[in-house]
């Protein structure tokens, strides 16, 4: 066993791994660079598969079933900027090592790690939870006329736009036995506290009561035809929807629609990549033997490690460059 | 470019040349300005992407095309400058050409699934 390990896994032995600094004569590259690019090629196929699933589902979506304007654009823009800044700082960290400036390397790497951490924190503690407390009910087409005041399909048809089948907002009352009953109760308490109104909970047992978003409060207003940069406040208008008229109803979780299924899958996988990058950067930043400890014995090797980790990080940034417009903006 | 060897080694006590600033240090330093410019360009282009998404280009598809063009320019900048593809060795470019071909094949499969060009298979039972 130990023979096998020492033969095939030089990582666990004292044996020198060749071409960590010097270029291999045949490829002209140090080996890790070849390795990371092969890995990134496989990553292109991984994300490529998911992006093509996105395209397939989006093109195949019936008119009115691919939502827009449900994500927080200012927050998404800020997160995009944070990733771009971290891409600059990681390349600065590498350049600092190349110029043998350990202090500057530590500083730029720290900024990079912090940027990654802010990105993830915003995603996990703000963006996603906000979605999980936002509700949408797709109305059956045959019942849509009953809810015209919230859907505005006459206006949309007259102006040549896709129809609207969904009423979104905060759920204040759920049908009996719904798994959203607890969330609805909490939202109803909040609503009563904010507005002083106690009419949110209906005695009927098969009704959804939704405190609707601005777009459903004034669906025929031209101002609501296109999404806005700054998210609009939820209105105080209440929509009472009979469960009989509902095709499907869910919080903004993957089960809500193919839109949110692909959104959470792709941003989730991207988030895991950000987390992976942060962990590697932490390792290279802390005084581990393979991290900053390597600076004493072989600074060029450390610089190469940072370059490799940086290449991965830039790729993660590059994926986000496409994720941001296709989910948040278009 | 000549090697700007300096005496500012962080570990002057070590009797080794590994902490000398390498020969291409000046070149790397000159790149720093370029990295900053590219970073600034990416931030501006992010603003452009957001701004253009609120401009009506006639149809949703047209907006998507415009958005993807800007995103591709941004991705190109990241790949060429931050990922050092500009001036990278031919081996890596060969990998990338193959990756491009396979990725295009993947998207072509999606296109086939959508356009369903072999008639009479999917709809035969209807």
Image (cartoon, helix red, strand yellow):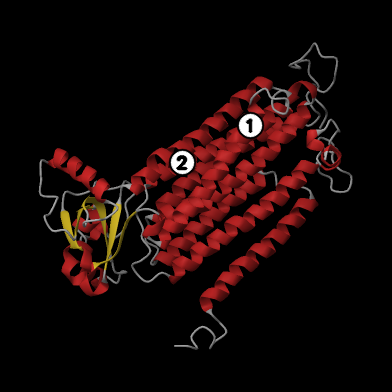
Q: Nearer the viewer, residue A269 or A224?
A: A269
Rendering coords of residue A269 (x, y %): 53, 49
For the point 52% across and 64% down, the residue is A53
Q: Residue furthest top?
A: B13
Q: Determine which residue is flagged by label 1.
A: A92
Q: Nearer the viewer, residue A262 or B54?
A: A262
Q: CA distance from mark 2 to mark 1?
A: 20 Å
Q: Secondary structure at mark 1?
A: helix
For the point 56% across and 36% down, the residue is A86
Q: Locate the N terminus of chain A and report the quarter of the image it occupies.
A: top right
**Is A189 on the left or on the right of A1, as rendered?**
left
The disc numbered 2 marks a residue on which chain? A
The disc numbered 1 marks a residue on which chain? A
Q: Residue furthest front?
A: A1
Q: Determine which residue is flagged by label 2.
A: A79
Q: Is residue A196 above or below residue A299?
A: below
Q: Is residue A51 above or below residue B89?
A: below
For the point 22% across and 64% down, the residue is A243
Q: Locate the C terminus of chain A and report the quarter of the image it occupies.
A: bottom left
**Is A66 on the left or on the right of B118, as rendered?**
left
């Amino acid at each position: 066993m130990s023979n096998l390990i020492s033969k095939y896994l030089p990582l666990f032995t004292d044996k020198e791994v060749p071409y960590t600094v010097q270029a291999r004569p045949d490829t002209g590259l140090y080996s890790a660079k070849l390795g990371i690019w092969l890995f990134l090629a496989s990553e292109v196929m991984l994300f490529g598969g998911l992006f093509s699933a996105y395209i397939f589902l989006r093109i195949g979506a019936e008119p009115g079933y691919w939502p827009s304007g449900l994500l927080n654009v200012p927050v998404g823009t800020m997160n995009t900027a944070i990733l771009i800044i971290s891409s600059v700082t990681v390349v600065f960290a590498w350049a600092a090592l190349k110029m043998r400036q350990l202090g500057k390397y530590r500083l730029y790497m720290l900024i990079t790690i912090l940027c990654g951490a802010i990105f993830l924190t915003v995603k996990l503690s703000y963006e996603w939870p906000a979605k999980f407390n936002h509700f949408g009910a797709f109305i059956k087409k045959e019942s849509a006329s009953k809810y015209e005041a919230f859907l505005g399909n006459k206006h949309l048809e007259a102006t040549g736009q896709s129809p609207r089948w969904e009423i979104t907002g905060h759920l204040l009352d759920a049908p009996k036995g719904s798994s959203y009953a607890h969330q609805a109760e909490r939202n109803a308490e909040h609503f009563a506290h904010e507005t002083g109104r106690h009419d949110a909970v209906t005695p009927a047992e098969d009704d959804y009561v939704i405190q609707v978003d601005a777009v459903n409060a004034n669906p025929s207003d031209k101002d609501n035809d296109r999404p806005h940069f700054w998210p609009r406040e939820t209105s105080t208008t209440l929509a009472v929807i009979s469960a009989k008229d509902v095709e499907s109803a869910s919080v903004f979780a993957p089960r809500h629609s193919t839109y949110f299924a692909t959104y959470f899958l792709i941003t989730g996988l991207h988030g895991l990549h950000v987390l992976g990058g942060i962990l590697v950067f932490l390792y290279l930043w802390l005084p581990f033997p393979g991290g900053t400890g390597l600076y004493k014995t072989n600074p060029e090797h450390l610089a190469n490690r940072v370059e490799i980790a940086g290449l991965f990080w830039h790729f993660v940034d590059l994926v986000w460059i496409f994720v941001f417009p296709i989910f948040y903006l278009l | 470019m000549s090697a700007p060897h300096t005496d500012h080694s962080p570990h002057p006590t070590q009797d080794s040349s590994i902490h000398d600033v390498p020969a291409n240090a000046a070149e790397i330093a000159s790149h720093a300005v370029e990295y900053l410019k590219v970073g600034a360009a990416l931030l501006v282009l992010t603003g452009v992407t957001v701004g253009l998404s609120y401009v009506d280009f006639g149809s949703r598809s047209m907006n998507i095309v415009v958005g993807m063009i800007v995103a591709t320019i941004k991705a190109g900048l990241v790949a060429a400058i931050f990922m050092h593809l500009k001036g990278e060795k031919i081996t890596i470019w060969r990998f990338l050409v193959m990756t491009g071909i396979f990725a295009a094949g993947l998207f072509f499969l999606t296109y086939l699934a959508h356009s369903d060009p072999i008639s009479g298979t999917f709809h035969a039972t209807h």
